Image (cartoon, helix red, strand yellow):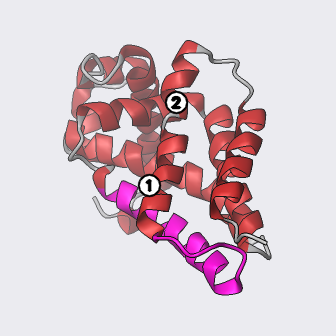
Amino acid sequence: MASESRTFIEEARRAQIIDCAIEALATLGYQQASMAKIAKLAKVTPGLISYHFGGKDELIEAVVAHVVKLATDLMLPRILAQTTATDALRAYFESNLEFMHRHRKPLLALVEIIVHDRDGPYAGQQDTALTDIEKVLAWGQQTGEFREFELRPMAIAIRGAIDAVPSYLLKDPDYDLGGLAAELATIFSLATRRAP
């Protein structure tokens, strides 16, 4: 169903189902988050989920799109507001980890999707994330803030550091993400900066 033709009530129902799918994925895991269990959480029939999404694959795609939008809505304005690449890189770490702090269940749902459906709807997002980091790194090289290095390996290292955080949060949910963000920003500031 095209989004332009959906009514307010249909959009609200879709949002409710996506929220329940996130809850199911985060608490039950990908394998156990069946359409029936999601429908039960949403207090609707599985048929109504199929009406709005077509099936589980389309629902998973909608969950990924929703979580990615939550992240970009929080992160992008902060990163773009910076006047230096060094500050943009710091904002990248801080906003990423703030997203993880604020949106634990959507984060866990996304991790479940990534782990169990590697070629699924999130696969393209990984390359987009690396390209976005590369833009900040290239900016820093152009302004002379950053030393010369290959962009992709550094972007992979940065993304790898961030992607390691969710599994650690499962073991220690109260870990100081603000402190971790500051430390990661410092590590990569040292790794990228031009020698005096």
- Amino acid type shown at disc 2: Pro
Figure check: 146 above or below 175: below
> What is the spatial separation of the Cα atoms under label 1 and label 2, in whole angstroms?
17 Å
x and y percent of residue 92 in the render? 65, 56
- The disc at residue 50 is none
- Residue in the foreground of this view, choosing between 163 and 114: 163
**Residue located beneath label 1 in the image:** 156
**Residue located beneath label 2 in the image:** 166
Prevalent SS, magenta region: helix
x and y percent of residue 158 in the render? 53, 52
State which quadrant residue 40 falls in: top left
Dot placed on the residue nearer the N-terminal end, 1 or 2: 1
- Amino acid type shown at disc 1: Ile
User: Does the magenta-highlighted stretch encompass residue 136?
Assistant: yes
User: Does the magenta-highlighted stretch encompass residue 135?
Assistant: yes
Which residues are the magenta region? 124-150
Q: Residue furthest front?
A: 196
x and y percent of residue 4 in the render? 40, 68
- Residue in the foreground of this view, choosing between 84 and 46: 84
Residue at 23% in and 37% down = 117
Figure check: 55 above or below 172: below
In this rendering, which labeled residue sits more in front, label 1 or label 2? Answer: 1
x and y percent of residue 179 in the render? 78, 34
